Amino acid sequence: MRLILLGPPGAGKGTQASSIAEKYQVEHISTGDIFRYHIKNNTELGKKVKEYTDNGKLVPDELTCEIVWERLDREDCQKGFLLDGFPRTLQQAEILEQGLKERGQALDSVISIEVPNEILLERLSGRRVCNSCGEPYHTKNKSPKVEGVCDTCGGEIVQRKDDLEATVRNRIQVYEEQTAPLIDYYKERDLLLSVDGTKAIEVVREEIFATLASFSSKDC
Ligand code: AMP
């Protein structure tokens, strides 16, 4: 299976991606996670992309596509992949489509998780994360037992710079301007499956599995 998970920041892509990748036994590739890894380790790539990610801006297409192809061409992706956070622009989608064609491959489906802006803003600006193990928290519904200290590993709980309210608003605007047009792009190619991302995590997960199953059987 070659899948894309599309959706605005805060739609729950990362959470759903882990379950989908596990069920379909494919590699979960998150460009955001790759960039964060490089920034944390202060690599050359990390130094180049930090300013963009800190401000909620998109990393240039050329650089992003280069790291994606480097990853997709590895052995473990030959059985399939789930892209989370890529593509995010029409140009990235075209480069992906062309590159897959050159490799004799094609996408199976694109899952679009839909959530209205007010909910995204509340979800993201209240989000906190453990600096060491990555365990997620939320000011509204998941506080740690001791303020600022991770329940799981005792690490420090922080707010990601790109989750600050002004940056979140910017990320949502960037999504609407640059990424939302991909919904029509994939609809035209008959690949789009839409799910309601406002429901509980497990409900959204089941809806994704059911939609994917009916879409695959339609192809047979
Ligand atoms: P995410 O965790 O997916 O929201 O990604 C965090 C940040 O990484 C984004 O706000 C962008 O700055 C950058 N980023 C991730 N994926 C892409 C992409 N496909 N194109 C450009 N920038 C990206």
Image (cartoon, rainbow, N blue to C red):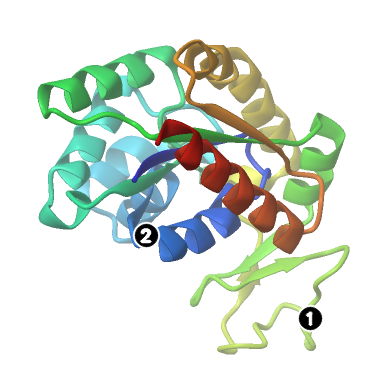
Q: Position of residue 98 (x, y in %)?
A: 22, 17
Q: Is residue 46 left or right of residue 220?
A: left
Residue 52 shows in the view: no
Q: Which residue corresponds to the image point at 35% horizontal and 13% vertical from the top-left? A: 91
- Mark 1: few/some/many CA within 10 Å (<14, 14-19, 20+): few
Q: Quadrant of residue 40?
A: bottom left
Of mark 2 and mark 1, the one earlier in the sequence is: 2
Q: Is residue 86 above or below residue 77?
A: above
> Contact, CB < 8 Å: mark 2 with mark 1?
no
Image point (42%, 32%), residue name = 219
Which residue does the image show at 52% across and 37% down from the upper left? 215
Question: Percent x, y for residue 185?
Answer: 49, 12
Q: Which quadrant holds the C terminus?
A: top left
Find disc 2 in the rendering and name its residue. Answer: 40
Q: Which residue is mark 1?
A: 147
> Which residue occupies the foreground of this view, 67 or 144?
67
**Horizontal and vertical percent for residue 127?**
72, 57
